[in-house]
Image: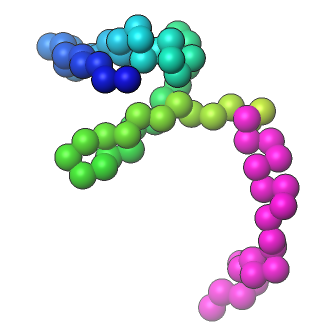
Amino acid sequence: MSATATLSSKYQISIPKSVREELHWQSGQQFVFIPKGKGVLLMPVPSFEQLKGLATNADASGYRDRGDRF
């Protein structure tokens, strides 16, 4: 999946159709830009439904709460 796009004079980039289709990105979907060296990582913002159950098996034994701060 190698595709290119050009930054417009209004600082907009159109994501190539082949990329949108392969990643199932939809119109209106929100994204976050994460700076990485001289580039940027573009990631879709997950919905609350996608995050449900993410920490189901998390170990809370070493959890630091506000009560143990100075």
Decide which of 15, 10 is in the foreground and name it: 15
Q: Main secondary structure of the magenta part?
A: loop
The percent coordinates of residue 42 (x first, y second) are: 41, 34
Q: Residue at left 68%, top 31%?
A: 47
The percent coordinates of residue 45 (x first, y second) are: 56, 33
Above or below, comparing residue 39 to residue 19 in the picture: below
Residue 69 horizontal side relative to residue 52, left or right = left
Start-end of magenta stretch: 50-70
In what quadrant of the picture does the N terminus appear?
top left
- The reply to whether the magenta stretch includes residue 49 is no
- Classify residue 46 by image quadrant: top right
Furthest residue toward front: 1
Q: Residue at left 24%, top 52%?
A: 37
Q: Residue at left 66%, top 86%?
A: 69
Residue 27 horizontal side relative to residue 39, left or right = right
Residue 28 in sight here: no
